[in-house]
Amino acid sequence: MIILNKQKEYIEKIKKIIEKNNLNFTYYIETFGCSLNENDSEKFEGIFELSGMRKQNTPDGASLIVFNTCAIRENAEKRLLGRLGAVKKEAINGAIILIGGCMMQQEENIKLVKEKFPFVDLIFGTHTSFRLPENLYNIISGIYEEETKKEKETEANKNNKKRKTYVDILDIDGEIYEGMPVKRGEGSSAYVTIMYGCNNFCTYCIVPYVRGRERSRKPEYILNEIRDLVKEGYTKITLLGQNVNSYKGEGDILDFADLIDEICKIDGLKELSFISPHPKDFTDKIISSIAKNDKVSRNLHYPLQSGSTRILKKMNRKYTKEQYISRAKKIFEKVPNVSLSTDIIVGFPGETEEDFEETLDVVKKIDFDQIFMFIYSPRAGTIAYNMKDEYIPREVQNKRFERLKQLYNKRLDEINEKYVGRIEKVIVEGESKNNENMLEARNKNNKILIFEKYPNWKKGDEVKIKITKNHRWYLKGEKI
Ligand code: SAH
Ligand code: SF4
Ligand code: F3S
């Protein structure tokens, strides 16, 4: 583990350049992908803010434009290429353009960006993001400080580019870096990454290749970060990792269950969530830790991926349909009023009609309050990518996706009925997005509740609501 003092010196140096040249330096950042990427972007923003830059919400006229990329599915990559094309005007006008994140850990993407978008100033990856202050300093000092400027310009002319494209990528991972500044979002929720990387190599998934091997942060750093956040008023904490329940600690906090227990002791913390756990590591100890700590959110993510044991094996998920179902039942039994969300991939290579029916069967048997559905997207470098003979035609994938969606809608209506009649204490989040005469809140199962705007009720108030009606995507309630 490394503490980033040297990088903090670069932040100071950038700040001096901005002040010396009296620059109105603004940044714009766009994040693709999962909450781990969002948390990384919060760290980038922390660096920019400490350097004396100001955030803006559009790329127009920004001094610095950053894309934090995702490689999980093809559409994430396509979107990035479109967005890069769209900021060419800003680049020509002198904006510094940086691209980081998972997609840049793949060599072919670096090549693509360098060829198609030579105006990019820096390409960095997930293992080198801690060096962002240093890399940014090199670029900014190259532009604003005379002696280095000449040198860089010659190089840029030689390559016939606006400026040189720096590339800072490491294939190896290992070290965890502590001490990055973080700029949190508004509101009372904050992300805390507890582990990096993934060792599971699910055969469809690119993450282990772009995020490296599993590394857990030391418990004391996690606990201190959460204590500080709670003091600052962040009362809802979400722990992040690609497989949070395989967390490995030290001392008295050895595993994920111990970590939950310890975090829940923090005074002032109201709600603890985590994404994503892996069903194979959902131990009895973790289930009982969730059950006994009522600060833990009653909405758990429990990713299925497929209901067919044969496909699960091909996916390298390390559980069977029956094991998945019996563990889900145990969760429902031990944690009263819990709700589950899940991820499902349809059209994985070799998925037969019977396999798909097995997936539908699990959706019929288990009450999922939320299903994130994906059509299998081949990722070069993964094992499933090479199962080309067994790829499922697009029309078949689309049809299965539609059938799953239909079933999900029907199930949701059934599942929502069990909420009708319940009395819930919730915090008003604000006006409903679709109806300004109504207020909105989420209950502990992450369900959206909509209710009338009583004159003295306002954002942040804790109110008691009786749920009266299911509207599929939300529940209607009234004051009691
Ligand atoms: N670590 C998390 C998942 C991260 S990716 C977990 O194990 O649950 C989020 C979701 O994207 C996955 O759960 C999976 O459903 C989906 N996904 C990942 N790779 C995919 C691919 N190649 N095609 C389609 N969906 C994919
Ligand atoms: Fe990907 Fe599987 Fe790791 Fe999740 S557990 S990140 S799906 S390899
Ligand atoms: Fe995408 Fe990387 Fe997350 S590939 S889903 S941003 S870990």
Image (spheres, rainbow, N blue to C red):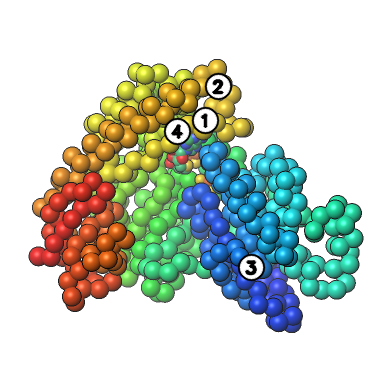
Q: Which residue is mark 4?
A: 375
**Which of the two residues, 83 or 21, is positioned nearer the viewer here?**
83
Which of the labelled discs sits on residue 61, or is there none?
3
Dots 2, 1 in contact, CB < 8 A: yes
CA distance for labels 4 and 2: 16 Å
Q: Residue at x 73, y 77 (%)?
A: 17
Nearer-the-camera pick, 280 or 408: 408
Q: CA distance from mark 1 to mark 4?
A: 15 Å
Is the residue marked 4 within 8 Å of ligand 1, measured from its CB? yes
Amino acid, disc 4: Ile
Which of disc 3 and disc 4 is earlier in sequence?
Answer: 3
| Residue underneath mark 1 | 203
- Of the two numbered discs 3 and 2 in the rendering, the one whose residue sits closer to the viewer: 3
Q: Mark 1 and ligand 2: say if the CB distance to the nearest ligand atom is below 8 Å.
A: no
The kind of secondary structure element at disc 1 is loop
Marks 4, 3: nearer the viewer? 3
Q: CA distance from mark 4 to mark 3?
A: 37 Å
* Residue 220 point in image, percent of width and height: 48, 62
The amino acid at mark 1 is Thr
- In the structure shown, which secondary structural element does the residue marked by tag 2 occupy? loop
Give the residue at mark 2: 387
